[in-house]
Amino acid sequence: MVRPTDPSALSEFAVELARGAGRLAYDGRRAHFDVVTKSTPTDMVTDVDRQVEAWLIDTILRRRPDDAILGEEGGGRTGTSGVRWILDPIDGTVNFVLGIAQYAVSVAVEIDSRVQAGAVYNPEADELFTAVEGAGAFLNGRRLSGPRAVPLERAVVGTGFGYARPRRAAQATVAAALLDQVADIRRQGSASLDLCALAAGRLDAYYEVGLNPWDWSAGLLVAVEAGCAVSGLRGREPGSQMTAGTRPELAPAFFALLEQLGADDV
Ligand code: IPD
């Protein structure tokens, strides 16, 4: 059987996966769940994260056994089809544990090493963000067009902080200096939803250091397809060292300020 590698067809499957996994996470939040820690004592994972990832992988492999997978909770495999699924079963696990309605399932579809479709679903808000390369970004079917037209000093900037103490201290220094130059800062606790918030005009700009591909892959495509400029600073691609974005007109000033503050050197 020939399995399609067309981004639109795979996007439909990504939506099905994100919605199904979101339902599991939503139900899991309302039952008993266990919490353990990962890289540091504050980096949490729950058994719901692991169950949701296992369901995602099982569902993908039953339908598309030749695809590769990269999952946050260790679910990885190589494939032969040229398609790789990049999965975050619960992005915003701390929010999930605390009962803050700001977490999401993130499903990105990489085809021939490029993310070409993505779905980010917040089951608490019933908000589904989707994007297909070259075809725009949508929230529950409504097209997104990125941040407001405000100057840097009126921009509300989203960011996040790592789990390791030395990096957090350096990130706090950058954030303190930035606060003096922008309207305000938000730390919402889910990188994929931060990128989607940028796409939806709920943030004017966003930057974060130290993310992993499962945090940013789907959300970044949503932001780009909503017309945002994204960067890794100093001519680099956005990624684990730095993921930054804003509207194109604000990008030169925002990225220059982040470079000047050494935001990517923490
Ligand atoms: C985390 C969230 C958070 C970001 C962290 C991520 P997780 O993902 O996206 O906003 O600041 O760097 O690790 O651990 O909840 O999947």
Image: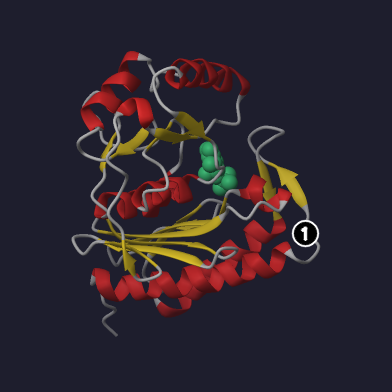
| Rendered location of residue 8, percent (x, y) | 26, 72
Q: Which residue is mark 1?
A: 33
Q: Is residue 145 above or below residue 250?
A: below
Q: Is residue 28 above or below residue 59?
A: above
Q: Is residue 11 left or right of residue 157?
A: left
Q: Is residue 66 above or below residue 264?
A: below
Look at 34% across and 51% down and name the residue there: 199
The three-letter amino acid code for the residue at tag 1 is: Phe
| Extreme residue toward the bottom, this view | 1
| Rendered location of residue 163, percent (x, y) | 60, 31
Which one is nearer the viewer's eye here, 177 or 154? 154
| Rendered location of residue 179, percent (x, y) | 46, 21
Look at 51% across and 15% down and name the residue there: 173
Look at 29% across and 85% down and name the residue there: 1
Look at 42% across and 34% down and name the residue there: 157
Q: Is residue 150 left or right of residue 140?
A: left
Element at badge 1? loop
Q: Residue 31's image quarter?
A: bottom right
